[in-house]
Image (cartoon, grey):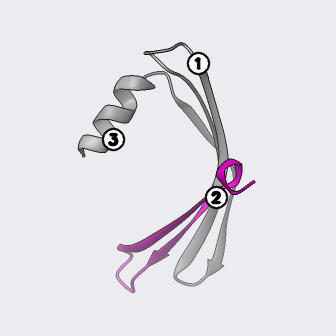
């Protein structure tokens, strides 16, 4: 919770968008996303792109979120 609070204190104007949401199995889905924000400390822009695969249990509860940041991987 503290990490989220710190992040949004620095990037309060973040806008995120999913360009694709798709099932990958009966208990998993994948989302491809991008975000833009501006640092409140430095004024520097932040842009990121990536994907996450979310795995659910049989009751629909999230059991795992695997995130790949395209920009960090390149």
Which quadrant would residue 46 be assigned to in this image?
A: top right
Crowdedness of circle 2 by 10 Å Cα count: few (<14), some, many (20+)?
some
Mark 1: secondary structure: loop
| Mark 3 or mark 1, whichever is nearer to me | 1
Residue 53: percent from the left, percent from the top? Answer: 57, 68
Q: Give the number of marks.
A: 3
Taking depth in this image into account, of 65 and 2 the one nearest to the observer is 2
Q: Which residue is mark 2?
A: 51
Residue 70: percent from the left, percent from the top? Answer: 70, 53
Left or right of 43? Residue 33 is right
Taking depth in this image into account, of 70 and 60 the one nearest to the observer is 70
Taking depth in this image into account, of 9 and 34 the one nearest to the observer is 9
Inter-mark Cα distance, 2 to 3: 19 Å
| Mark 2 or mark 1, whichever is nearer to me | 1
Residue 23: percent from the left, percent from the top? Answer: 64, 73
Residue at 64% x, 41% y: name it. Answer: 48
Crowdedness of circle 1 by 10 Å Cα count: few (<14), some, many (20+)?
few
- Asked if residue 12 lies in the magenta stretch, the reply is no
Q: Which mark is residue 44?
A: 1
Residue 26: percent from the left, percent from the top? Answer: 57, 84
Inter-mark Cα distance, 2 to 1: 23 Å
Mark 3: secondary structure: helix
Residue at 43% x, 15% y: name it. Answer: 41
Residue at 38% x, 30% y: name it. Answer: 8
Residue at 51% x, 28% y: name it. Answer: 14
Taking depth in this image into account, of 71 and 27 the one nearest to the observer is 71
Q: Which residues are magenta?
A: 51-74
Q: Earlier in the sequence, mark 2 or mark 3?
A: 3
Q: Which mark is residue 4?
A: 3
Left or right of 60? Residue 55 is right
Mark 2: secondary structure: strand
Left or right of 68? Residue 12 is left
């Amino acid at each position: 919770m503290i990490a989220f609070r710190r992040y949004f204190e620095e990037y309060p104007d973040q806008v995120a968008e999913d360009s694709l949401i798709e099932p990958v199995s009966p208990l998993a889905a994948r989302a491809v996303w991008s975000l833009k924000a501006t640092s409140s400390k430095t004024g520097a822009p932040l842009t990121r792109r990536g994907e996450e695969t979310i795995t659910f249990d049989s009751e629909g509860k999230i059991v795992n979120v695997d995130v790949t940041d395209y920009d960090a991987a390149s």
